[in-house]
Amino acid sequence: ELYFALLFPGITVMFVFFIVGMAGASLLNERDTGTLRRLVAAPISKASVITGKALAYALLACAQVVVLFSVGRIAFGMPLGRSPLGLVVVTVLLGLVASAFGLMIAALARSAKQADNVGTMLGFLMAGLGGAIAIGPIPATRVEGIRSLLARLTPQGNAVESYYSLMAEKAALGDISTEVLTLAGFLVLFVAIAAWRFRYEQ
């Protein structure tokens, strides 16, 4: 059962970041077709338009987590720990980080196709570095050597560590404050870069 508390969160985190390329490509497609230009011409702020897009994909990511965790719990007896609040906080942060990462990719990419390809490639690469693909009995963040450091430098690694602590070790929200703050830091970084580089017109 404890292994499922590593396996399912890892798979879930990896799947959540599959929306990165989709989110970036969708935003660029709307810009290329002129839809985004019409939206920002309406009496709403540009920030509101982008925020709405980000929240929609973040909600999709959260729904993925709920579905996959439900399957893990019902079909495999995966433990959920004793902190529902912790699970909610990590899940919401994870969804927001993935969505913001997609917006950042859109801001840096030259086309919707490039955003989709780069987003998918980075999603796989960061999933591997972060330990979302479980190849051992413990999170990659706890493995000795450079692998632990690399995992800590990805949002995936911090998310998997958070879920494992909450579910397998029955940690409370306060026990994963470092990982939560790190995820929040990634969120701020991705949003800042997206806001700085994104162009609303071609």
Image (cartoon, grey):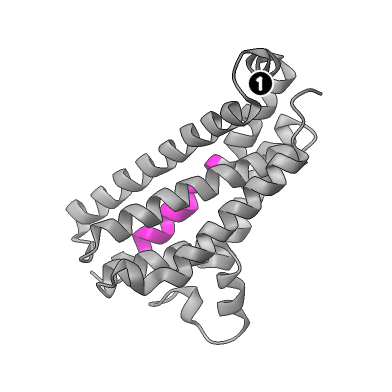
Left/right of residue 145 with respect to residue 175 in the rendered view: right
Locate the C terminus by quadrant. top right
Nearer to me, 99 or 38:
38
Q: Quadrant of residue 198?
A: top right
Left/right of residue 197 with respect to residue 119 in the rendered view: right
* Residue at x 28%, y 57% (from the top left corner): 85
* Residue at x 27%, y 75% (from the top left corner): 169
In reply to whether residue 13 is colored magenta, the answer given is yes
Q: Is residue 188 shown above or below 3?
A: above
Q: Quadrant of residue 49?
A: top right
The residue singled out by tag 1 in the image is 30
Q: Is residue 44 shown above or below 66?
A: above
* Residue at x 67%, y 44% (from the top left corner): 104
Tag 1: amino acid: Glu
Q: Is residue 155 shown above or below 68?
A: below
**Residue 156 in view (yes/no):** yes
Left/right of residue 105 with respect to residue 7 in the rendered view: right
Query: Percent from the top left, x then y, of residue 115?
Result: 70, 38
Query: Percent from the top left, x then y, of residue 158?
Result: 49, 66
Q: Residues within 10 Å of mark 1 (few under 14, many from 20)?
A: some
* Residue at x 54%, y 42% (from the top left corner): 99
Q: Which residues are magenta?
A: 7-19
**Residue 133 in view (yes/no):** no
Query: Percent from the top left, x then y, of residue 165?
Result: 34, 72
Locate the N terminus by quadrant. bottom left
The majority secondary structure of the magenta stretch comes to helix
Q: Is residue 142 shown above or below 161?
A: below
